[in-house]
Amino acid sequence: MADNSEKKKSPAKLPERPTSGRQKLMESALALAASTRSLATLGLREVARHAGLNPNTFYRHFKDFDDLGVAMLKELGTELRTGLRERRMRPAAKGFRLSDLSNPAEGLAQAQALARESVGLVLDFVKDHREAYIVGIRELHGTSPVMRKAMQQMLEDIAKDMTEDLLGVLKLPAVTPEEMIEVARVIVRQMVFFSMDYLDQPARQQEIKREAERFILLLFWGAIAARAPALLAQSGLKFPAI
Amino acid sequence: MADNSEKKKSPAKLPERPTSGRQKLMESALALAASTRSLATLGLREVARHAGLNPNTFYRHFKDFDDLGVAMLKELGTELRTGLRERRMRPAAKGFRLSDLSNPAEGLAQAQALARESVGLVLDFVKDHREAYIVGIRELHGTSPVMRKAMQQMLEDIAKDMTEDLLGVLKLPAVTPEEMIEVARVIVRQMVFFSMDYLDQPARQQEIKREAERFILLLFWGAIAARAPALLAQSGLKFPAI
DNA sequence: ACGCAAGGTATACACTCGTCTACCGGCACA
DNA sequence: TGTGCCGGTAGACGAGTGTATACCTTGCGT
């Protein structure tokens, strides 16, 4: 521990600069937050240590710890949304585009296929970005108001994306866009929980996937029943106004 | 700071022991967690200081910090569950007990009344226990695995209570208990988010209440549509198997 | 060729933290 | 009358933290 004659490995030739310090700090913060399981608990020194950097280097790039937080969120947030969007463009996802449709039963069949595809898509993504997901959700109900707002906004954006997709792909009778976004929001939020289960209980993954699909289908059935009372009237059922 | 001659205010006669130390610690922890906005960030010394106690006193009552957490959760959890239960026994809640019923529409009308009552009940409770709720939800996705498990268990218990009530009060056709608990779980989890909104946006409280009611009703409509296809078959609709 | 800013490092300081050991007053109860 | 235990206190130790100051490269612009 004493002073050895000469070392100074600091200015050694490091031909590799793949991650540029700032990046290393963010990655370390993410990794630590996912293992230690909180951003708020993280320490400046701890992150720097894990990144193999001097504690003070932190100040070169971020002023607060919130500062690093919003930077991470911005990066991961765009990654998530674009990730979802591009996977939504895959062939399988576009397989069941349909022109117009007056039969609700047909619409529900399409909805089922779309639900299955979407659920798998989200859960796969979550599994592929386990760390980011865990940390993000923690911030959703977390300490910093800034983070919380940003996180809520991200969920809302995803819900809006989903609404567009749903409105574009399937035509459920008499379901207005306003109701659609409400349904989408509910789905997105519920998926937060399903995703948690999915990560926490690997043995039940298939079952959880089915539960999520059933949930979505239930909502669509409900939406049709609530919004197409005329169609259901023939069956003799009378639904209370919503 | 030096040693004054004689003091020792410690063994002074304290006729008041309204909150017995342990209680003081838990209350301080709750207050601090709700203001500092995290249990994980809390420090043993910090809590003791806020409670006006010696740091070591903490060890007399709790061994971990998780220990205090589960104690708080147990207290508040039972308060919540019994609160919900006794309010569920109020006259208004029992108003629509019904014997047997073959008409799903009738069942749905009952469901709507029950949904309205239950939603109001939960949201009132949340508003009355704002601090506890915020802290609790934070722990639901929080750092400590112990807390997380405990919190999930509490939600699950509430869902079970709700299932019993639902099965007892209203008879939806062909909805099995297994499906009922699944629906109840989904409702409870969604109420977590609705409650957050409710606390965060006081101006929209009535609107949020309506959204929650609509969500629940949607689920029941969906459940009937999914589980009583025979009833709906007359309408000419054919629903895909779930 | 010089300067200078960016990124990184080393050392140091004042704090806070969790925990350990030891001491003390009341109360129950045998 | 003693003798434990329970709840509370005091002080100290070692480790970890955030931050301040100062020094050292490297690269780029002029």
Image (cartoon, coloured by chain):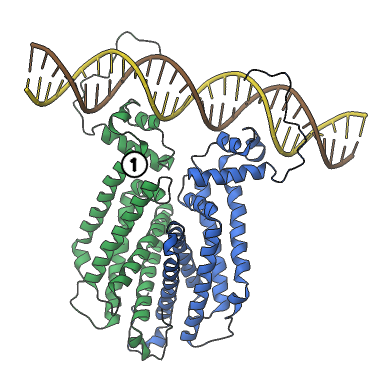
Chain colours: A green, B blue, C brown, D yellow
Q: Quadrant of residue B124?
A: bottom right
Location of the N terminus of chain A (image quadrant): top left
Badge 1 sits on which subunit?
A
Residue at x 29% of width, y 79% of height: A174
Location of the C terminus of chain A (image quadrant): bottom left
- State whether residue A28 is above or below residue A175: above
Using the rendered image of the protein, determine whether residue A46 is visible from the camera's viewpoint.
yes
Residue at x 62% of width, y 58% of height: B79
Residue B174 x/y as whole percent = 48, 81
Q: Residue furthest top?
A: A5
Residue B162 x/y as whole percent = 54, 69
* Three-letter amino acid code at the position of disc 1: Gly
Indicate left or right for B203 with B9 as reference.
left
Residue at x 59% of width, y 65% of height: B84
Residue D13 x/y as whole percent = 57, 19
Q: Number of numbered discs present?
A: 1
Q: Residues within 10 Å of mark 1 (few under 14, many from 20)?
A: many
Using the rendered image of the protein, determine whether residue B234 is visible from the camera's viewpoint.
no
Which residue has dot 1 on it? A69
Residue A125 x/y as whole percent = 30, 54
- State whether residue B199 is above or below residue A179: above
Indicate left or right for A82 with B240 as reference.
left
Q: Quadrant of residue A22?
A: top left
- Which secondary structure, mark 1? helix
Residue at x 57% of width, y 67% of height: B161
